Image: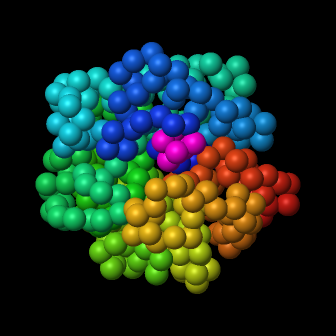
Amino acid sequence: MTDGGLETDLLFNRGIDLPHFASVVLLANDEGRAALEGYYRPYLELAHRFGCGFVLESATWRASSDWAAPLGLQLVDLDRLNVAAVDLLHHLRAEFDHDQLEIVVSGCVGPRGDGYDPGRIMGVTEAADYHGHQIRVLASAGVDMLSALTMTNVHEATGIALAAAQISLPVAISFTVETDGRLPTGESLKDAVGEVDEATGEYPAYFMINCAHPDHFLPLLAGGGVWTKRIRGVRANASRCSHQELDAMTDLDAGDPSDLARLYRHLVELQPQLTVLGGCCGTDLRHITAIAEACMSPSRPS
């Protein structure tokens, strides 16, 4: 298991201001750190309830170097917050160590720009150089792996994978798709996975899909094919709305947790290798609890 939509939960459900959607700023003071602990801890308790492992993602999705200036920070200050985000996860893992849960500390890397719009697409080398800085900072803090979430294009995803390979750190690459199941660039998910694997010697530990409703990508996985076995995780949106519709909303669309859980159950029946289950925009503990109840019963396919 992994968590739900950190930023949307904090912002819409808990009323916590996140400038530029950057949850990393909460690590700057004790109150913010306590809010993050309060967010993560119930998920770990849920994992204990089901006796399953948990991927703890750092609050660093919007914490690469370009975001320092918009957040009013120097790069060195942003680096410290990246380290503090990982330190918090180590603290939580130690707290739950007595439960003998398999807890993986993951350094979260987000896109250089927007998670919905690829904008200016970097070349692979530029992407590796750009993301390499944050990746090295997260590695220095002691992450077990990296997760590149809401990747909108192949070049950026490839650059991140190569930067991770340079320091021999496992990485999961998670693409976001539109309502037609294609990347925002128009490329098919199948081709995106294949191109990253070809360019990196299949370096990513696995691929994921996030920031899209299951209705938008379930037909792709239902079609089967060898390439789908590289997809090991899903962090879906609660809403069936498009990214453009979500961008225009002022209220959160939390969808129906039970319906979302039903679709997750269908996904794991189709693709039993899906073992990292969490949520993205609009999801919270209610959704992940429903997903766990639906997908981790004794009758789940193995």
Residue under the image location 67 percent in, 33 percent down? 42
Count of residue discs: 0
Which quadrant of the figure has residue 232? bottom right
Q: Position of residue 270 (x, y in %)?
A: 68, 73
> Farthest bottom residue?
223
Characterize the magenta stretch by its predominant secondary structure.
helix
Residue under the image location 85 percent in, 54 percent down? 298
Most foreground residue, 103 or 153: 153
Q: Position of residue 145 (x, y in %)?
A: 43, 40
Q: Which residues are magenta?
A: 8-13
Which quadrant of the figure has residue 20? top left
Most foreground residue, 12 or 102: 12
Quarter of the image with the C terminus is bottom right
Residue under the image location 63 percent in, 29 percent down? 41
Task: Give yes or no for residue 247 being in the magenta stretch.
Answer: no
Task: Give yes or no for residue 10 being in the magenta stretch.
Answer: yes
Which quadrant of the figure has residue 138? top left
Whether residue 124 is visible, yes or no, is yes
